[in-house]
Amino acid sequence: MTPRTYEHPDADRIAIPRVLFALSEPLRLDMVRLLAERGELDSLELGPDLPRSTLTHHTSLLRESGIVFVRAEGRKCMIRLREDDLEHRFPGLLGSVLAGYAPEEDA
């Protein structure tokens, strides 16, 4: 069986409108916060109670916007933040967004 591969935008093609759109949804912002706190995670850890189709939609949007890097590891779909790429393109953006975000249960 051929391993799954994922397409990611080159670092210099990450666009601020797409990043801000991806970060504008509370569920995706929670996923990004979790990745920032815990590092690389299996996609199922980002939304254990979500239908797989919903999880796939949101993680794909994060990947396509350049916020996360996704790789296959056996049956797992491992996801990590592209912190260095985002910091290089938009210094301080991710840290500022996460610092100003209070998850719904904390708000």
Image (cartoon, rainbow, N blue to C red):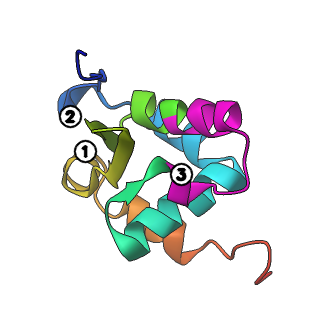
Q: Which of 12 and 30 is in front in this view?
A: 30
- The alpha-carbon separation of the residues under discs 1 and 3 comes to 28 Å
Q: Nearer the viewer, mark 1 or mark 3?
A: 3
* Region of the chain picked out in magenta, as a range: 44-59
Q: Which of marks 2 and 3 is nearer the N terminus?
A: 2
| x and y, in percent, of residue 28 in the image | 61, 50
* Callout 2 crowding tier (Cα within 10 Å): few <14, some 14–19, many ≥20: some
User: Looking at the rendered structure, which numbered label has been put on residue 67?
Assistant: none
Does the rendering let one see residue 49? yes
Secondary structure mostly taken by the magenta-highlighted segment of the chain: helix
> Which residue has dot 3 on it?
44
Q: Which residue lies furthest to the top in this view?
A: 2
Residue 87 in the figure: left or right of residue 53:
left
Q: In this view, does 26 lie above or below 66?
A: below
Q: Which of 67 and 40 is in front in this view?
A: 40
Q: Residue furthest front?
A: 1
Marks 1/3 in contact by CB < 8 Å: the verdict is no
Circle 2 SS class:
helix
Q: Which of marks 2 and 3 is in front?
A: 3
Amino acid carrying mark 1 in the image? Arg
User: Considering the image in quadrants, where does the N terminus appear?
Assistant: top left
Marks 1/2 in contact by CB < 8 Å: the verdict is yes
| x and y, in percent, of residue 57 in the image | 61, 30
* Callout 1 crowding tier (Cα within 10 Å): few <14, some 14–19, many ≥20: some
At 47% from the left edge and 39% from the top edge, which residue is drawn? 19
> Which residue has dot 2 on it?
11
Q: Nearer the viewer, residue 51 or 84?
A: 51
Amino acid carrying mark 2 in the image? Ala
Q: Is residue 63 above or below residue 44?
A: above
User: Looking at the rendered structure, which numbered label has been put on residue 89?
Assistant: 1
Examine the image and state in which quarter residue 68 appears.
top left
- The alpha-carbon separation of the residues under discs 1 and 2 comes to 7 Å
